Amino acid sequence: MEHLPIKQKITIMVAVLASMLFAALNQTIVGTALPIIVSDLGGMNYFSWIFTIYMLASSVTAILVGRLSDMYGRKPFILIGLGLFIVASFFCGTADTMVELILYRGFQGLAGGMIFSTAFASIGDLFSPRERGRWQGLMAAVFGLSSVFGPTLGGYIVDHFAWKWIFWIFLPVGFVAFVLIMRLFPSVPRKDHGRIDYFGSVFLAATIIPMLLAFSWAGNQYAWGSFQVNGLFALSIVALLAFLYTERKVSNPVLPLSLFGNSVFTISNIIGLLIGMAMFGAIMYMPFFIQGVIGTSATKTGFIMMSMMLSMVLSSTIVGQLITKTGKYKKMAIFGLTMMGIGIFSLTTLNTNSTNIDVIYRLVIIGLGLGCSFPIFNITIQNAVAYKYLGVATSSVQLFRQLGGTIGVSVMGAIMNMIMSAKMDTTTSKAGLQGGMEKAADPKVLMDPEQLEAFKAQVPAEQADMLNQVISAMRNTLSDALGGAFLFGVFTMVLAVILVLFLKEVRLKTSNQEDDEEENIIQVEENKRSTV
């Protein structure tokens, strides 16, 4: 599709970006609206499944559709994804029970995986590796903007309208994107790559789903080392072994293992996994510090977190342009990962005396580093593999990043809980809390300034000093626990910087046709050897 007029390419990319924004906003807008949804529908015990089911469904379909789109073209899958997402979003707003909402969110996840997978691969269809930098930067900017405006808009909608509108408000964007892609996106004739690898697909899904569930539930629903968590890990390992065996036997594997023989592909995906660990960990646990240690309201916390995403949008856009202009990326990757590591390390220096300004400039550093590195590894992988594997290779980036986020959030949570448990036992025993004062030692109270003030008002005046001492000790405990969790993020970034040093900087191709030429040369050489 490189031969298309530039105006048509840009129009197609606007539609693809609109599709991404439509799906990404629906993913991020739910968080702030969730308390209202739970109060309306009930099902408090199941609310986490609203996120979990989406994550599971999107992770599985992203990698599977990536391979299928290499065989059948991107257009049918991005249209199916958009159509299903529109329908699922509409039904999410009609849910009368939590079970219904979880079911519809599952369909949203299936569709979201299709959209994200084909959208990133579409850049590879339309543009050469050298030209992809600016568009990968814009894709990263779309994710950043959705993370900024999604939660804020979700809070505004539930404050002024029915919560159902968080799922309906962007439906026109989805319709417009669907029509534009249907009319402008070229259809690609089916390529004969053989039969679909059904067994490999099943075993791959059976590997991913238990693994993600194990890391999501460990330390929350179930303890680390529990029968449930260990059972899920065991099931994942068995499925992985079956998947590896199957992929070696079939002629058309869903995830060709030969790709991992490419050092650029393997190293880039491992770095993506490490970035996901640090990025999602920071996004998940920084609000704990802002609200629980500093005492900032939830609304202001959202605005503070914006600083990270806005700086990411800025740097990803600039870096994308620089890659396209220079054709170089390794130094930028080293710079971005190093800056991100420095920013995360600076989070460990925060304490109970820190202010919101102290947090903001640290988040800006993280965001700038994240924006520098986020778009690069899509480009390195797409540039390193043959064009016929573009879809599955691009989808692997999304999969590894999602796995990294799930693992990182789980491990950081385990570290935080371990440190807090050890220090809280000491704090409560020294204070000798009794007579209802035990509630002051509950970290959840620190997360809600209004609830904390209400609790203070109920405490007798003679116990006010003791209460303030306990609250101060709990803030210190939470600060230390989060500092320990962020150290794990620093460790992942150190590993990422070391790995990128071993990343071979391959010349960015100026045309997708170079892949076909290289394959033809290889085939000719093989034919010569076989003849001899």
Image: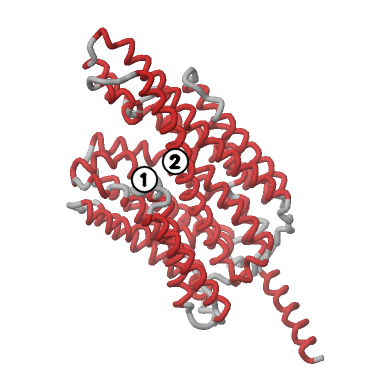
Q: Say what amino acid the circle numbered 1 marks.
A: Asn
Specify which label sits upstream in the sequence, 1 or 2. Answer: 1
Image point (63%, 36%), residue name: 339
Image coords of residue 372 (percent x, y): 62, 43
- Callout 2 crowding tier (Cα within 10 Å): few <14, some 14–19, many ≥20: many
Query: What residue is at 44 percent from the left and 26 percent from the top?
Result: 477
Residue designated by label 2 = 413
Q: In this view, does 379 lie to the left or right of 70?
A: right
Q: Is residue 296 visible?
A: yes
- Amino acid found under the numbered disc labelled 2: Gly
Q: Regarding mark 2 in the picture, which secondary structure is present there?
A: helix
Q: How is the image coloured?
A: secondary structure
Picture quarter with the C terminus:
bottom right
Locate residue 358, reporting x and y percent: 52, 23
Q: Residue 220 carries which label?
A: 1
Distance from Cα at disc 1 to Cα at disc 2: 9 Å
From the image, which quarter does the N terminus lie in? bottom right
Where 126 sits versus 242, above or below? above
Q: Which residue is drawn at 24% across and 51% down?
A: 93
In the orientation shown, which residue stands out farthest toward the bottom? Answer: 531
Q: Badge 1 local density, few (<14 within 10 Å), some, or many (20+)?
A: few
What element does badge 1 sit on?
A: loop
